[in-house]
Amino acid sequence: MRIIVQKFGGTSVASPEVRELVLRKIEKARSQGYSPVVVVSAMGRQGAPYATDTLIGVAKTANKNIAAHELDQIMYCGEMISAVVMAGTLQAAGMDAVMLTGGHAGIITDTNFTDARILKVDPTRINSLLKQGKVPVVCGFQGMTTEYEFTTLGRGGSDTTASALGAALNAELVEIYTDVDGIMTADPRIVDNPKILECISYGEVCQLAHQGAKVIHPRAVEIAMQKNIPLVVKSTFTDAAGTLITNIAKEDPDGAEVIDRVATGVTYLTNIVQIKVHLDDSMGGDASFKVFKTMADNGISVDLINIHPGQIMFTINAEHAEQASMKLRQQGYEIAVLENCAKVSVVGGGMREVPGVMASFIEALSSNRIVILQTVDSHTSISVLVPRSDVGAAVQALHEKFGLSN
Ligand code: ADP
Ligand code: ASP
Ligand code: MG
């Protein structure tokens, strides 16, 4: 049996008209000899009645800090509604479609409500439906604990469902259908002229996704990579070929990846706060260790870390800023907090050891009078912290400088 997983995002299932387009994509896969497993997200984006953000809003009218366990029970509903509607649409077209929750589809998770990790996938039920010629329509984003509690897989987690099912079913291909023609060199919402990437390696797309390109969930890529299952990101609304994600990077004799582009894309993350901690000799040798230990003990992840004699700089997500400042001040640290920052990154598997990459990066920003608050680099990315108000200009400037514009 040739299994294909076809995942349709929120905008792809938002109205009867677009659900007809989904139907055609499924019919096409069947006509090509595939047995499709369909995965759906909640219908529409913020403002739509059953979108995930709308459901979160409903819960938060009762309590802004409602517990993650309860939040999951309402977030779960969006995909339930969507999968019922999609299964009904397929049935109306004569397909033997069967709606399955994440738990029914065999997705077992830990108990980390709202951001649960998949522990295992038991594909028995889906395999049996496929053998009977049925079309499983699975709720994305959902899992179930071993105690039969509902969980969700983190925002954007329907991609993870698709990939995990693809891996468990040994699918030939996982298709991620969305509202853009593929993975682009930058978010088309903030850059005028991005290019579509025809193919990209698992490693590169993971980097792009972790650094903010929300077009695919990084965990979905990691799971597909483990089993070498090809992923294609493509549009529900067009017939464009989309972006193929595979292990395209070849190994050279020295073991280094060969990719002929220096930069693959430019990404951004907003809602970032920079914290500067002043250190002096009276604090003892382990003062910097204690700063990071305090963050770790409070479950706050840190990024963009620079350690200098007398000062530590790092960034955190804005939602943790109040707690982090309070804890550090309680311990006697003198700190400066800068709110409303954004992290902009140029990502590229080919940038290692290429001279002048950092110089180009700085030139692009300074010639546009963008203030650089902090930088950090690795073999495959350079990131900079800028004021949030400059994020659009910074992404556009870097996109042009690295020759990514169409
Ligand atoms: P879905 O609901 O289909 O999962 P998402 O909103 O999660 O859709 O992802 C698609 C969106 O990702 C696009 O509308 C686009 O604005 C955004 N995006 C961000 N970065 C990129 C990028 N590098 N390439 C393509 N799309 C991107
Ligand atoms: N509906 C969920 C969300 O909005 C999952 C997804 O769309 O992938 O985060
Ligand atoms: Mg998504």
Image: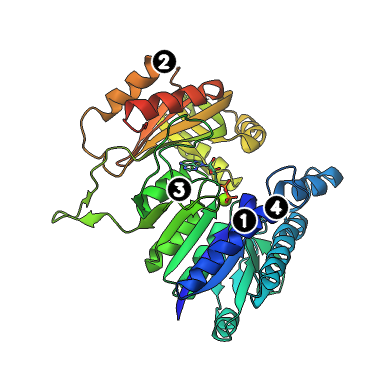
Q: Amino acid at mark 4?
A: Ser
Q: Amino acid at mark 3?
A: Gly
Mark seen at residue 64: none
Q: Quadrant of the N terminus?
A: bottom left
Kindly identify the amino acid type of the residue bearing the numbered disc 1: Asp
Residue behind mark 3: 182
Q: Which mark is residue 115?
A: 1
Q: Residue furthest left?
A: 253
Position of 70 relative to 298 (above/below)? below
Q: What secondary structure is marked by label 2? A: loop
Read off the residue under disc 2: 368
Q: Nearer the viewer, residue 22 or 75?
A: 22
Secondary structure, mark 4, is loop
User: On the picture, is 347 further left or further right than 92?
Assistant: left
Between the residue at mark 1 and the residue at mark 4, the CA separation in whole angstroms equals: 28 Å
At label 1, counting other C-alpha atoms closer than 10 Å, the crowd grade (few under 14, some 14-19, many 20 or more) is some
Q: CA distance from mark 3 to mark 4?
A: 21 Å
Q: Are marks 3 and 1 in contact (CB under 8 Å)?
A: no
